[in-house]
Amino acid sequence: MTKLPTAQSRSAKTPRHWKVHVETLQKSGKSRAEYCRQYKLSYHALAYWQRKLSDQKTSTETTLVPVPFQSFIKQHSAVPDRAALKIILPDKTAIEVGDDFSSATLTRLLATLERR
């Protein structure tokens, strides 16, 4: 069983001191107010350390997820492998449209080009 720091050792309130209290509080089933009264602790200090220790715990639990590099490049390539449709205008401007193009967008684009 962990020996809990007492109120007499107030000068020794290190992060370890608060970690012990935070862990014991979680296991105790008591409210924070009850626990603080029992051990003569500052309610706000204990709340602060609960947040601080919780933040440290979550920030160190980083999970890396492998991403297949080749599929990433293929999906996010700026240059499509092959355009489904290629429009070359008289001034040598080329418009390439992929298989998943929006017909509404293409219609607006062509209307804009016709007006110039």
Image: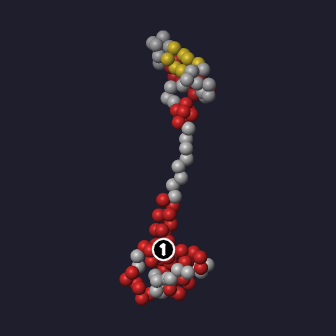
Q: Which sits in the foreground, 26 or 77?
A: 26
Q: Quadrant of the N terminus?
A: bottom right
Can residue 77 be seen here? The reply is yes
Q: Is residue 100 left or right of residue 36?
A: right
**Count of numbered badges drawn on the protein:** 1
Q: Residue at horizontal 59%, vertical 79%? A: 28
Q: Which sits in the foreground, 32 or 64?
A: 64
Residue occupied by mark 1: 19
Q: Residue at horizontal 55%, vertical 44%? A: 66
Which percent across, then down, holds residue 4? 50, 82
Which percent across, then down, holds residue 114? 52, 17
Eyeballing the image, is 77 above or below 91? below
- The kind of residue tagged 1 is Lys
Which percent across, then down, holds residue 111? 55, 21
Q: In the structure shown, which secondary structural element does the residue marked by tag 1 occupy?
A: helix
Q: Residue at horizontal 58%, vertical 24%? A: 98
Q: Is residue 12 left or right of residue 116?
A: left
